[in-house]
Image: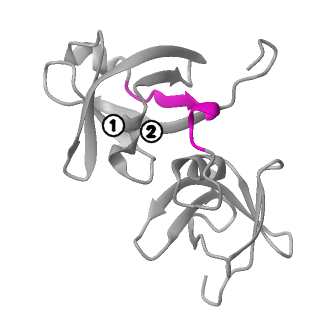
Amino acid sequence: MSGTEEIRWVTLGYVMGAFGLKGEMRVRSLTERPDGIFDHPVWWLFNPKQKTRQEMRLGSGRLHGKGVVATLAGVTTREAVQALFGTEIQVPRSMLPDGGDDPGVDGIWADLIGCQVVEVDGTELGRVVEMMATGANDVLIVRGGPEGEKLLPYIEEVVVELDLDRQIIKVKLMEGM
């Protein structure tokens, strides 16, 4: 990567708060497998209010209930974790796998988050804010449109066109959607 290329950051999760007293944190993982976030030993914590990004090394991580708990090197108190509340856990897009034709690879999920979703007739439905694995197929969670939140299956019958360069997903809604 040359010094003039802009880094494309991908959000893998969010710091949700402290877990205990010794620097552990609850994390909302956006990766297909919740523990997939631990595949990345270095996290960049982005504070959206201050527009700052800080590089941190993952200390440890584990599944806990339906979520994940992690520690970061140098973050050893509950107060230090609370100061990170709401930060986005990011990595450069270049550190994610290409994904090829496998829609279940985190790299592909990361590429879909933020895309504008429109029906084939041009009606805007919102933006992909999250992905969800259901077992049968992945689901796009779309918010910000006039009809509120929509859950759209990520299948060929619904997703008719995917333009990642323009960040647009064209869909054909099935009856009842």
Q: Is residue 26 magenta?
A: no
Q: Are marks 2 and 1 in contact (CB under 8 Å)?
A: yes
The x, y position of residue 93, in whole percent, is 63, 34
Residue 21: x %, y % from top left: 13, 21
The amino acid pointed to by label 2 is: Gly
Q: Amino acid at mark 1?
A: Val
Q: Secondary structure at mark 1?
A: strand
Which numbered circle lies on residue 13?
2
Query: Quick one: SS at disc 2?
Result: strand
Residue 147, placed above or below residue 4: below
**In the image, what residue occupies the spot 54% across and 29% down?**
91
The span shown in magenta is 85-97
Classify residue 88 as left or right of residue 177: left
Viewer-closest of 39 and 168: 39
How busy is the neighbourhood of tag 1: few (under 14 within 10 Å), some, or many (20 plus)? many
Task: Identify the residue at image location x=37%, y=42%.
Answer: 28
Q: Residue furthest left?
A: 21
Quarter containing the C terminus: bottom right
Q: Quadrant of residue 58?
A: top left
Mark 2 residue crowding within 10 angstroms, few (<14) / some (14–19) / many (20+): some
- Residue 171 lies, with reference to residue 54, above or below; the image says below
Q: Which mark is residue 64?
A: none
Instruction: Please name whichever residue, 18 or 76, is drawn nearer the observer in this view of the structure.
Output: 76
Residue 147, percent across and down? 65, 68
Name, please, the residue furthest toward the front. Answer: 100
Is residue 177 positioned above or below 30 on the image? below
Q: Residue at x 40, y 36 (%)?
A: 39
The N terminus: image quadrant = top right
* CA distance separating discs 2 and 1: 7 Å
Residue furthest toward the bottom?
Answer: 175
Q: Disc 1 designates what residue?
A: 27
Q: Please name whichever residue, 141 or 39, is drawn nearer the observer in this view of the structure.
A: 39
